[in-house]
Amino acid sequence: MLLNAGRRIVKAKDFRRVYRQGRKVSGKMLKLYYLPNKYDLTRFGFSISKKVGKAVKRNLLKRRLREICRKHINSFQPGLDVVLVARESAVQSNFNELEQEVLNLGRWGKILVKEESSDPGD
C-alpha cells in the first residue's frame, strides 16, 4: 500500500493553512506541523528546501519520509493534516534515524494514537 493521493497534502493553500493555524514541534532533523482537518483521514505533506541539497538528495529524503508515514499511518490520530519540514541535517541521516525522529515528534506533539504500529507488510 502506498501513501496515495488522498493521504497527501499537495495544494499550496493547504500547506499555508497548516503553517499558519497549526501547532509546531521541532527536532534535530525535522519540524512537524499539525492541524485538525475536516476529513476523517490523516494527510501528510512534505517540504524540503533547496538548501537541503540537489534534487537527487531531496527526492531520496522525500521518499524516505513518505515510506515512514505510510508504515506508521495507523499510529497517527485520524483527522489531522501533518506537514514534515526537513532541515539540512536530515540528508546525512539514515532511514532508522528519520523514523525515530518522526515518531518522537509525534509523541511530543501528542498526535500518536498508540506507541508503535506494526505494518503487516514488513
Image (tube, rainbow, N blue to C red):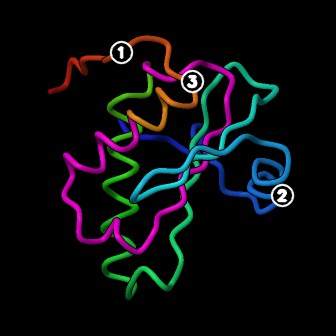
Where residue 100 sits, quadrant-wise, is top left
Image position of 24 with respect to 122: above or below = below
Where is residue 42? Give x, y as percent.
Answer: 60, 29
Cα separation between marks 2 and 3:
22 Å
Query: Where is residue 98 drawn, in percent x and y?
Result: 30, 50
Tell me if mark 3 has few (under 14), some (14-19) or many (20+) residues whose alpha carbon lies within 10 angstroms of its own: some
Point out which mark residue 13 bears.
2
Q: Residue at x 38, y 85 (%)?
A: 53
**At 31% from the left edge and 17% from the top edge, which residue is drawn?**
117
Which range of residues does the magenta coloring cover?
75-103
Mark 2: secondary structure: helix
Disc 2 marks which amino acid? Answer: Lys
Q: Mark 1 falls on what kind of element?
A: loop
Reading the image, the residue beneath label 1 is 115
Name the residue rendered at 49%, 20% in the picture.
112
Answer left or right for 13 relative to 56. right
Disc 3 on helix, strand or loop?
loop
**Rounded to the nearest whole Å, what is the CA distance between mark 1 and mark 2?**
31 Å
- Give the class, few, some or many, for how many residues have Cα within 10 Å of label 2's Cα (few <14, many ≥20): few
Percent x, y for residue 93?
23, 62
Up-down relation of residue 69 to residue 91 (above or below): above
Which of the two discs, 2 and 3, sits closer to the camera?
Answer: 3
Which residue extends farthest top?
Answer: 114
The residue carrying mark 3 is 111
Q: Does residue 42 belong to the magenta stretch? A: no
- Residue visible at 23% across and 70% down? 92
Does the segment drawn in magenta span residue 89?
yes
Farthest residue toward the left?
A: 122
**Closer to the eye: label 1 or 2:** 1
Q: Nearer the viewer, residue 55 or 75?
A: 75
